[in-house]
Image: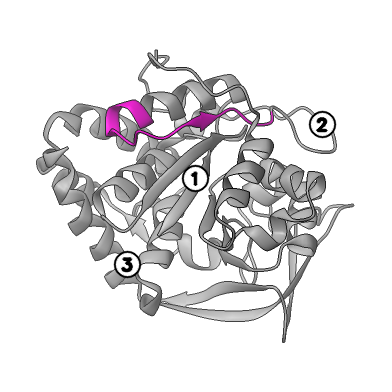
């Protein structure tokens, strides 16, 4: 499956990129960066560095630094760390991003092979929204837009209404939900239920080879944030679960319909879902243990990289 990953690394973004490399199901056409867990500068550096280290051999395009509405976004280092990877410092990639910005890159790549490339958006949706706004053909050319975002029948994680990726750019989210032709969304309804624990981390580190110190540091930081919020069972595998929904769709149950994103008031960022014929489906339930097992067993191949 040909995919472009739009990402804001981020601990769980890094885990998703590990899964993308080790699962063997994807042809990585490219990667794009977006603000979110970190600033756009750090997101681009982290994306370039991860691509180099994992040997994706794919171009990286830098994306938007702020939401469509122009409100400056400030990352929260308490969740992922100052530079996105726990207490690890700034990444120093050897490669550079292509001259195109992320939206133009998405437009160009999907136009080359219409109907073949899936966009996997793991952060705020501004790059995808910009592509939809700039070129009406983009919606037809992309195979599917897969989103980690939303809280459809469950509370949010920014507040009781909104999930972070949607909240951090609600205008872009509405553009995507209104203009895209085919959307698969994996939100907090699932990802808040699939937690990896400290015992899972010990298992991951055992099979991680030279990646073990990096993974241990990142994940301990991430787990500590969840524990500080009273969630001691583990931390959410938000981004890896989104990719797993493409590789193992039989482990998920989806509901089809339409979404409107609330733009004003205390419920801004709420993803209001209406069941029926529509352009999107969201993961309403999943086989939690099987999804976690798919992730952990796949990452056992990490030492071979």
Residue identified by numbered label 3: 291
Name the outermost residue toward the front: 112
Eye-nearest disc, 2 or 1: 1
Secondary-structure class at tag 2: loop
Q: Residue at x 37, y 79 (%)?
A: 250
Q: Give the alpha-carbon distance from disc 2 to disc 1, as whole Å.
A: 24 Å
Task: Check disc 3: other Cα within 10 Å, few if <14, some if 14-19, many if 20+.
Answer: many
Q: Give the alpha-carbon distance from disc 3 to disc 1, as whole Å.
A: 20 Å
Point out the tag, 2 or 1, that comes first from the N-terminus.
1
Q: Is residue 280 left or right of residue 96?
A: right
Q: Residue at x 28, y 33 (%)?
A: 55
Asked if disc 2 and disc 1 are in contact, CB closer than 8 Å, the reply is no
Asked if disc 3 and disc 2 are in contact, CB closer than 8 Å, the reply is no
Q: Is residue 130 visible?
A: yes
Secondary-structure class at tag 1: strand
Task: Give x and y (percent) for residue 177.
Answer: 74, 62
Residue identified by numbered label 1: 5
Q: Which residues are magenta?
A: 51-64
Task: Give x and y (percent) for residue 301.
Answer: 15, 48
Q: Give the alpha-carbon distance from disc 3 to disc 2, as whole Å.
A: 36 Å
* In-front residue for pair 88/175: 175
Secondary-structure class at tag 3: helix
Residue identified by numbered label 2: 71
Eye-nearest disc, 3 or 1: 1
Q: Is residue 61 left or right of residue 46?
A: right
Task: Give x and y (percent) for residue 238.
Answer: 46, 53
Quadrant of image for the C terminus: top left
Q: Is residue 44 left or right of residue 26?
A: right
């Amino acid at each position: 499956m040909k995919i472009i990953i739009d990402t804001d690394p981020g601990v769980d973004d890094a885990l998703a990129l590990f899964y993308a490399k080790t699962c063997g199901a994807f042809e990585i056409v490219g990667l794009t960066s977006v603000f979110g867990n970190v600033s756009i500068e750090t997101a681009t550096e982290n994306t370039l560095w991860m691509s180099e280290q994992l040997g994706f051999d794919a171009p990286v395009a830098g994306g938007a630094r702020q939401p469509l509405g122009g409100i400056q976004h400030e990352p929260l280092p308490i969740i992922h760390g100052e530079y996105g990877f726990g207490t690890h410092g700034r990444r120093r990639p050897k490669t550079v991003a292509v001259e195109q910005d992320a939206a133009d890159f998405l437009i160009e790549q999907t136009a080359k092979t219409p109907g073949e490339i899936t966009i996997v958006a793991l952060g705020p949706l501004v790059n995808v929204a910009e592509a939809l706004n700039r070129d009406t053909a983009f919606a037809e050319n992309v195979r599917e837009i897969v989103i980690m975002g939303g809280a459809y029948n469950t509370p949010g994680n920014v507040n009781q209404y909104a999930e972070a990726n949607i909240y951090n750019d609600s205008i872009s989210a509405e553009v995507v939900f209104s203009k895209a032709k085919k959307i698969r969304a994996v939100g907090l309804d699932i990802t808040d239920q699939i937690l990896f624990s400290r015992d899972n981390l010990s298992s991951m580190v055992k099979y991680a080879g030279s990646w073990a110190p990096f993974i241990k540091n990142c994940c301990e930081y991430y787990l500590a944030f969840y524990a500080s919020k009273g969630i001691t069972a583990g931390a959410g595998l938000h981004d890896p679960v989104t990719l797993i929904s493409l590789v193992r769709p039989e482990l998920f149950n989806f509901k089809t319909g339409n979404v409107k994103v609330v733009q004003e008031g205390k419920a801004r960022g709420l993803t209001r879902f209406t069941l029926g014929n529509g352009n999107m489906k969201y993961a309403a339930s999943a086989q939690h243990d099987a999804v976690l097992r798919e992730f952990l067993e796949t990452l056992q191949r990490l030492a071979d990289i």
